[in-house]
Image (cartoon, rainbow, N blue to C red):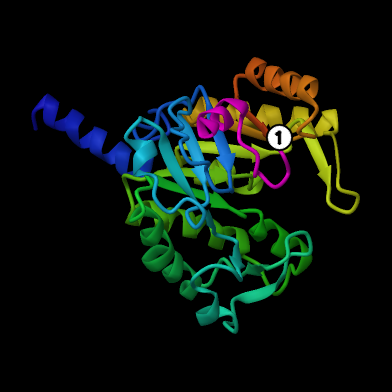
């Protein structure tokens, strides 16, 4: 077999399985990015943003943004079903629906081992996102798997394995789309070969849902997670996106968090807890 044929086969194989020694070719490292779940103001181009994680129901057409070079990734909850999505009426009584998330009304934990849920995501939810012009998906609520094994260790044993299998199945079905994970620390080493970027929340800050207040993360937690994320980034050549929440009026705190993330070799975005405030430069675009 000729040399270049061997190289070609190796290259294709790496693309298929997410080779740990090669950076992703599906998405460049973003010097600027946002995670935003509201509607985008009329007139905004997002041309100053490399990567935009958006809610496809609120931003159903992203072609005007992608033509300017912005990689638009659509929100998909893989560990929770949401009662305001198109699929809810068909699954609300399904056996894989477990219980409502106390912190987020209308969001219900699902059993990630469910083949029915996997089929719904792969055959209906994700195609709907991609058909709207999105280049890929943002895998939210991966943490459900860890939560279920912690709260119901007997009933949901294997939930983490099920979530890993789900991510793998999505990559196998859609080998060329951008896939960004959210949190899911116990899964990260296992799903890293299949994703293009790792997003983590609350690396430097915290938010108390009971009191509605912002705070600073325990430095020991920050250090533990930072070490793990640095190792994953080095091993798998994936960028680490840090998403922290802070009072929108605290501009000094925002700059401090952004500086800490950059110094750690990560890519920061700092927003409000509901992710419904756009950065100032995009707001100005939409006000023109």
Residue name at image x 69 percent, y 28 percent: 226
- Front one among 181 and 206: 206
Indicate the position of residue 165 as horizontal and vertical percent values.
48, 59
Residue interval drawn in magenta: 272-288
Residue, far left: 2
Indicate the position of residue 256 as horizontal and vertical percent values.
75, 19
Indicate the position of residue 224 as horizontal and vertical percent values.
75, 31
242 horizontally vs 180: left or right: right
Residue name at image x 45 percent, y 44 percent: 73
Residue name at image x 45 percent, y 37 percent: 196
Residue 279 colored in magenta in the image: yes
Residue 232 in sight in this render: no
Provide the residue designation for mark 1.
244
- Front one among 10 and 182: 182
Query: Is 26 placed above or below 172 here?
Result: above
Assess disc 1: are there few (<14), some (14-19) or many (≥20) residues with their C-alpha within 10 Å of its C-alpha.
many
Residue 287 in sight in this render: yes
Residue, far front: 288
Query: Is 166 placed above or below 202 here?
Result: below
Residue 105 colored in magenta in the image: no
Q: Quadrant of the N terminus?
A: top left
Q: Secondary structure at mark 1?
A: strand
Residue name at image x 43 percent, y 27 percent: 47
Residue, far bottom: 93
Task: Identify the image quadrant of residue 242.
Answer: top right
């Amino acid at each position: 077999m000729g040399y270049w044929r061997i190289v070609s086969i190796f290259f294709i194989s790496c693309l298929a399985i997410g080779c740990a020694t090669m950076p992703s070719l599906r998405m460049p490292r973003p010097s600027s990015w946002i995670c935003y779940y509201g509607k985008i103001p009329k007139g905004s181009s997002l041309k100053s943003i490399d990567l935009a994680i958006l809610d496809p129901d609120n931003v159903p057409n992203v072609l005007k943004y992608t033509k300017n070079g912005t990689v638009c990734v659509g929100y998909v909850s893989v560990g929770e079903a949401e009662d305001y999505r198109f699929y809810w009426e068909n699954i609300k009584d399904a056996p894989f629906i477990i219980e409502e998330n106390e912190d987020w009304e209308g969001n219900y934990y699902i059993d990630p081992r469910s083949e029915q849920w996997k089929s719904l995501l792969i055959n209906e939810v994700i195609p709907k996102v991609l058909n709207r012009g999105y280049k890929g998906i943002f895998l939210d609520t991966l943490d459900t798997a860890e939560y279920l094994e912690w709260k119901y260790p007997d009933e949901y044993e294997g939930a983490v394995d099920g979530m890993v299998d789900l991510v793998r199945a999505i990559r196998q079905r859609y080998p060329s789309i951008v896939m960004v994970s959210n949190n899911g620390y116990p899964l990260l080493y296992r799903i890293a070969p299949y994703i293009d970027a790792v997003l983590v929340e609350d690396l430097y800050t915290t938010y108390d849902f009971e009191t509605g207040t912002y705070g600073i993360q325990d430095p020991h937690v920050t250090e533990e997670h930072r070490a793990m994320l640095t190792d994953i980034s080095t091993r798998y050549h994936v960028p680490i996106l840090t998403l922290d929440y802070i009072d929108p009026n605290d501009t000094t705190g925002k700059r401090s968090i952004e500086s800490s993330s950059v110094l750690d070799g990560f890519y920061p975005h700092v927003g409000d807890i509901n992710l419904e405030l756009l950065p100032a430069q995009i707001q100005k675009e939409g006000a023109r």
